[in-house]
Amino acid sequence: MSFRVAASPHHHARVQTSTLMLKVALATLPGIAAQLYFFGYAVLIQLALAILTAWSAEALMLSLREKTIVNRLKDHSALVTGVLLAIAIPAYAPWWIVVLGTAFAIIVVKQLYGGLGNNLFNPAMAAYVLLLISFPQQMTAWTPPIALQAQQQSTFDPVCVVFTDFSCAGYSITQLKTDVDGMTMATPLDTLKTDLANNKTISESRQQPIFAEIGGVGWNWVNLGFLIGGLWLWQQGVIQWRIPVAVLVSLGICSSIGAMVDADQFASPLFHWFSGGTMLAAFFIATDPVSASTTAKGRLIYGALIGFLVYLIRTFGGFPDGYAFAVMLANLAVPLIDAYTKPRTYGHKAKGSE
Amino acid sequence: MTSLFQQIKSGMLWDFHGGIHPPARKTQTSQKPLGRLNLPERLFIPLRQHIGVAGKLLVQAGDYVLKGQPLTAADNAMAVPVHAPTSGHILAIDEHPSAHPSALPEPMIVLVPDGLEQWRERHPLDPELITRQQILARIQDAGIAGMGGAGFPTHIKSSASQGVDYLIINAAECEPYITADDMLMQSEAETIMQGIDILCDLLSPKAVLIGIEDDKPRAIAAMQQACANRKDFYVRVVPAKYPSGGEKQLIQRLTSKEVPAGRRPLDIGIVMQNVGTAFAIAQAVLHDIPLISRIVTVVGETLSRPQNVLALVGTPVGFLLDSCGFAAEAKQRVIMGGPMMGFTLPSLQIPIVKTSNCIIAPSNAELPAAGPELDCIRCGACAEACPATLLPQQLLWFSKAKDHDKLKEHHLSDCIECGACAYVCPSEIPLVHYYRVAKAEIREQHRDEVKAEQAKARFEARNERLEREKQERMAKNQALAAQRQSMLAVQQKQQIAEAASRVEPLAEALSKEQIIAERERKKAEARAYQAAKALTAQTDSTSSHSEPATEVAPTTNAEVAASADPRQSAVAAAIARAKAKKAASSGEVAETNQSPTNQSPTNNAVAEPVSPAETATEIPAPTASAESSKASDPRAAAVAAAIARAKAKKAANSGEIAPASHAEASLSDENHAEANNSPAQNVAAEPVTHAETATEMPAPTASAETSKATDPRTAAVAAAIARAKAKKAASISEAAQLGTAQFVENGVAITAPPVAAQSRDMSATELKQVISAPNEETTAPEHTVVVDVVTAEIGTADVVTADVVNAEIVNAEIVTAAKSVTHAAIDPKKAAIAAAIARAKAKKASDQSQEKSE
């Protein structure tokens, strides 16, 4: 009778990477649901395209790297990348935008850097930045909430728009972006930025119908949805509290300072929290373990850095929403943060103390 | 702010970073009573079951041992003896797989129980009445090592005499499945307390803390009851968390202190002992029961009766499993220890040792095997779980990269290998395994470095030693050389003094008249020289008959001069003699018989020149004149003689019936006369005699043909010799120079050859025969010498050409001369050298003459 020999420990917590990833993907469902409700089902088309592209790109790269394909696809990391990118980009962006973006994310940002666990940048965010800079016009294909849209959408409008750039009735994106008042609408952040640039005050800007709710109609709920999903992730132990809390607190502090300085020029913390991609960034994107900091203190610093950069870009930068840039810049800082935030080991004195 | 001690006394507890909560699964065994087993068929008792060295064997195969009998003896502090768990016979002492992750073979005693369980004599002690040392000795003799799993010798740990603040009894048992200590505490709480009392006697701590996890309610109750009436004994219940039972972690939980990296708990005033060890101490001291059994938890879903058992040390694991109803599954594991830190066993023959607290035989569903290892996703769960606050992620990357510096920076050595990080890793990376490999690599590298340092130190020491010896040798040599030089200087001074003392009388005798006489003599000499020169010129072109006339003059001159200075006169006389000889031999064959006249005692050098036989001078006058010019130097004279001889030979060879030997003989006489005149060469007279005799022998070379009739051999030899010498004379200046150099240096006189020259080719053996043939005019020793020399030169050549023969004979003659001179007690070494050199030069000369003739 021969017995199997193995190395200790022989007991395992049975928490696996694939489970973690799957839970992250599942946690986006509340947010997606909100998006569905307020903006139509175009986001589902984007999701489908992104997931398919992600799997294909991953399979291609794994075969080139001569690694097992199916087992590694089962770790769902490609799935999560595709999902996050699909959520982040405008729902009515042309189909090739999401395909290009996902392919870039998987092939270049993830696999070329060494595969799972070795990428320096968050793949979804790197792809988002690529798309934003390369195709600025397509990346502004944000439509207003259905309730506020001028043209009534037919059932297959999202399909038509995504695949043909024109609605089934023949309207272009720009036309679809017009609201009942004939104004071209954008995201709430975009609107605010434009108004501030036109020397309107915030309170004036907030008269617009889009600001019926704090974070903007529709956007409010989307962020709430992501917040719920994030909290569930934390409860499940998939993510730690440090990064999301740090992001939100940092953003809150910065915007509070701004609001205290001049409430008419600088938006309030609540607005910042519930508009744009704040919650998505805080709970889903910044918490990507591979590109984030690894030490406890380091994660706080990392989150704070992201919040701070998001505020800067939103308030003073050229782009309406800057979480992609903020996350990527923070990714660059991670090695340094890790080096300087090593915890004190048991039995050793803390560095510099006696 | 209360002191730490107050805080501890008040029951305050702290926590350590990280930790995990695996499912405990202890209820399967903690609720059941302790099982007692039958005796197994064989017991395998390893000689070493602790950290340290094995004791000395006291038994051998075939012995009968009693229960509790020591099988090894501790001969140093780190040795812990082992005892016979039961009575029986020792079957063998050989190597079996050990209770270690590697299962490498270790020496074990194989005991066959006889079932009688006969105890040896026991001597219980009263701890109150005995000294500390006696208690420690008893602990060591009872073979007690740490039973918590490490196996450190207890007598060393318990020997701290001062500085112990807290004695912590580790009853935490944090690993899942294990309930051995739980069982022990439930049943033997009072004995454990007695053991702790003994430890307190040894260590005198301020307080005793007993750390127990909260998942053992019955044990807690028992322990609390047992120490109810003991002062400063505190039972501390800690919330269950793995790994609270780790030494460093429990210390932190109970006292908030951290053991500094690389140090022991004793350095912060804490000693920790396992509760099982305390029990064993009590057994050993109070009842003289050595450590021969322990409680082992046998558990797993493949067992039908999992329970705690009291197992004898040395029981094979298979026996335990079978006693609990083992039904093996395909490809299952059998783990010795807990699921977190235990190791798998490759076979069931491996025995229980003092530190084995659990055997797990899980089914594959119960403890599934690890899945495939994926990449690290940097989730940080491992860092969250690490009780030592390490960064397992970074340790993993650096372990994979074999970056030892970074590993040291990240404190890899502080890892207690608890397995919490690998337990939580979602990618199922075997982190602890990577760290073990990295630690081993660092250890190996360190060992290699130490070895290299040692080798380097030894190498440098060796170099220094060699250098030192060399210096000493040089110094010694220098000292000796200086000594020699000083001795030599003394010697030289002595010689000079002697010489001076010899010379002085002569110098003193010189008055003014004598000086004038001296001057006259020299003038006469010069005139003689000039005359000789003129004579040479004449004799070269005219016949030899004119020579007698000229010959007389030098002789007369020689005689005149002789009176003024004995040496000079001797020289002059010699010259005259030579010339006379030459003149006589220029047509007179019979003059050969005049040789005897030359044999007059030459001790009186003056007499010689007056010999009538010396009236003949010969063709080799140039040689003679050349000779006479060098007459003043005996060595030069010797040289001149040699040259003259060579010339004579040549002349003879070229057709002149010139008994070159005569000339040579006369020359040699001259030489010897001169040689005799030098104070240091008196003894040269003898060889002169012999030489003259010898040279006379081949005299009948006047006509090789005529003499052949009478003595064909001798005639042939003479002719051949003449020929050879003539050849030599062909390159006379060179020969002269060569010869001069050599013979001046060595003062060797040349004599005539004792062996006749040959004129035909012959084989080596023939030649040997020829030269071995006795010759009435050659003395035996010289003859032998010649024979030896020629034999050596020719070797065993089949055919030796006549030239070679003659050359060899000529060589032989020179060698003989050297050797004969040697016989006369002149420096043999120098003579031998001279002989060899002469031989070589002769060969060269003969070769050259040969070439020229060709």
Image (cartoon, grey):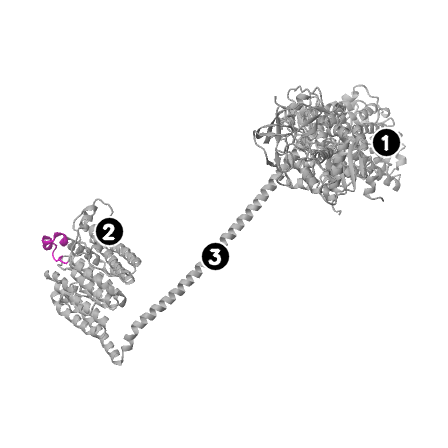
Q: Main secondary structure of the magenta part?
A: helix
Query: Residue beneath label 3, please?
Result: B472
Chain that bears disc 3: B
The lab-note entry on whether marks 2 and 3 share a chain reads yes
Q: Residues within 10 Å of mark 1 (few under 14, many from 20)?
A: many
Rounded to the nearest angstrom, the CA distance separating label 2 from label 1 is 130 Å
Q: Which residue lies furthest to the bottom in this view?
A: B512
* Element type at mark 1: loop
Residues marked 3 and 1 touching at CB (< 8 Å)? no
Picture coordinates of residue A317 (x, y %)?
A: 79, 38
Asked where in the image residue B400 lies, by quadrant, the reply is top right
Amino acid tagged 2 = Asp
Badges 2 and 3: C-beta atoms under 8 Å apart? no
Label 2 residue SS: helix
The percent coordinates of residue B431 (x first, y second) are: 68, 32
Does the magenta-highlighted stretch encompass residue B711?
A: yes
Same subunit, tags 2 and 1: no
Check disc 3 and report its element: helix, strand or loop: helix
Query: Depth check: B447 or A196 in front?
Result: B447
Q: Give the range drawn in magenta.
A: B699-715
Rendered image: mark on residue A215: 1
Q: Tag 3: residue type?
A: Glu
Disc on res. B688: none
Residue A12 in view, yes or no: yes
| CA distance separating discs 2 and 3 | 46 Å
The crowd level at tag 2 (other Cα within 10 Å; few <14, some 14-19, many 20+) is: some
Q: Name the residue under label 2.
A: B788
